[in-house]
Amino acid sequence: MGLNAQDPGLRTQDSGLRTQHSALRTADLNARRNRGTLRLGVLALALALVVMLGWKGLRVAEAAGRAQQDAGVALAALNAVQEHPMDAAGLAAAAPAFEAAARSLGALQAELQPIEPLLGLTRVLPSQASWLANVPDALAVAVSMTHVGATLAGPLAVALADGVGQGQLARSLQAVDRLAPALPDLADELDRVEPALARLRGRPLGGPLRQLGPAVERAAALWPVARQGLEALSVVGPALGMDGPRSYLLLGQNSGEIRASGGFIGSVGVLTVDQGAVVRFEYGSGYDVDPGVAVPPAPAPLARYLGLGGWYLRDANWWPDFPTTAAQVEQAWQRAGHGPVDGVIAFDTTVVEALLRAVGPLAVPGYGTVEADNFERLAVEQLYSPGAVASASSYHAAKATFLAPVGRALLARLLEVSPSELLPLGKALVQLLDAKHLQLAFKDQRLLRVVHARGWAGAMPAVDGDSLYVVDTTVSYGDTYSFVQSEVRLQMRVREDERVAHDLALRYANVYPRGLPVWMPPLVVSGGTFDLATGKLLETPGFWGDWLRVYLPPDAREVAVDGLADQSPPRQEFGRTLVEGYLPLSPGQQRTVRLRYVTSLGAVGAVDAYRLFLQKQAGVECRATSVVLLWPRSPAASYQGCPSHDGWIELRDAGRRESRKAPN
């Protein structure tokens, strides 16, 4: 009875097993049928390729053989040029090799164009055959590279041959001048082929293309540099006088006495170049430019805390927007009776030391070897010797006596840089421009467009979104900023009403005399400030007075400020909301300035990300920055770094992984 009672359950279980077995058999049959279909599809694709190639296989094979041969010759020529880049004969021999390779590769590309869709379908084939799908992109990149090489090599060879006996830089500039008409088209060609290169970089290359893997990775990494290089080459000739003499006003900014656009203008010069050669170079103290000239009143903070009776060129860099500063500088220059210039170039000590590292030590008559590691010490020794500090006139004369020959020696060395030095020198200059240690203002619209597009003009751009720009301006005497440490801490909270509450803390510490070099006399640091009550200059070694400016988004509201003396009401300047005031900082003192304000969230919430544009002040290496964003119902997002140039940071919402694009 018990056994019979279990029979229905056993029958049900057996029926279930049979159903499951039937389902497995059906799945197996379907899998076999799918594999069969896939084999048929692959076979059909292979047959289609055979049919398509049947009528033109010979032409394709012939074109491929010729392209392979010419590409090999071109590669050998490229290797020779890389070993001797300034060899006119080598470049002349490379030009026809590049041209032949470009023609034969282009012919192969044309032969394969009708079957490109079929080549793309081979991506489903095993790896031994799927490389065919990458052939169109590989050919596009190869044709572009050989065409660019052919376009560059010929004019370079002619220019270098014509320039035998000239300085290396002059020969290079003549070559660039010959290339100038073709550069815009070459830049467009690089733009067109960049997507093909990007696709190749993301795919495993097999078959005959496997050996191209390292070359593709290197080309992809260098492609943006090449594109930017072509853009820079299109203007470097005009900038250095290849189409006529160019004169530039040079501003030597002392970042130890930080000012809005980089530092106190302690030295000024004028440089005229023609056909890549220096035809005029004068350099001296910033005080010698406009003495005795009727000048306008200085900005109120400079008059109040430095006791300035007028606005001279040496103090003209009041604004953090360098184009505005450059215009004010040229006004002061011409007011003193000097002629117009084609541009203004500002640099700080970091630039001089970086150039000395790039081109090696200089032999300067009367001063021995000048190099990056001893330049500042030698300058202090000459400018603060007992004879130099005996009077104001002897101090300014000593400045010209030392800096002018060092400047001439450095310019002469730059005109003779070897081909192997050009690339590291170029990289060093780009880094200095990005970090605003070197700033350029040109009147030529071609040059102006390039420097603004690259962010090398030191301008305050229009910003669509949240932004922050902290600007220090020394309103005391001496190099005390060298002993000031500062950091930025910003906390933002996205509110339910789609507004963003900001809590900004700016922390400053004066560590003088910690870090004072043993060879630096205290007179260099100074610390003098103008006493409003007595009308006299008070000397407090190591004291730093700062006219602090903080530029916020234009829609900043409910602004509250703590920690500033002589604070001005918030106002609009350069398309931002400006908060400013006086911050005195004695040796050993720490102070915090706090700003609270509110901005609108705008379209940020739609993309679940918050973007903040951070600007770095010229003359400052970097400023330690911490940003925390509190979302209403998500984990906090954060950024921490020391930005070395202007750039955006991005903070994400909804628990998504933070994307931190930092301007480091």
Image (cartoon, rainbow, N blue to C red):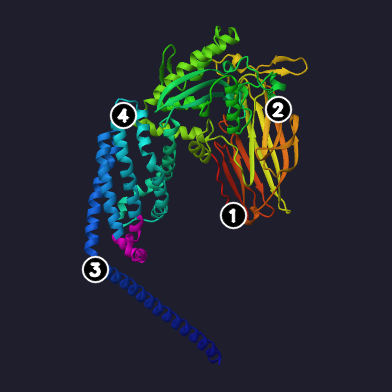
Considering the whole magenta stretch, tell me its main secondary structure: helix
**Amino acid found under the numbered disc labelled 2:** Leu
For the record, the magenta segment spans 111-137
Helix, strand or loop status at disc 1: loop
Label 3 secondary element: helix
Q: At label 1, which amino acid type do we have? A: Arg
- For label 1, the residue is 656
Asked whether residue 134 is drawn in magenta, I would say yes
Mark sitting earlier along the chain (4/3)? 3
Quick one: SS at disc 2?
strand
Q: Which mark is residue 54?
A: 3
Q: Which quadrant would residue 87 be assigned to in this image?
A: top left
Q: Out of 207 and 142, give the one closest to the viewer.
A: 142
The numbered dot on residue 163 is 4
The residue tagged 2 is: 583
Reading the chain from its start, which is encountered first: label 3 or label 2? 3
**330 relative to 643, above or below:** above
**N-terminal-most mark, 4 or 2:** 4
Q: Earlier in the sequence, mark 3 or mark 1?
A: 3
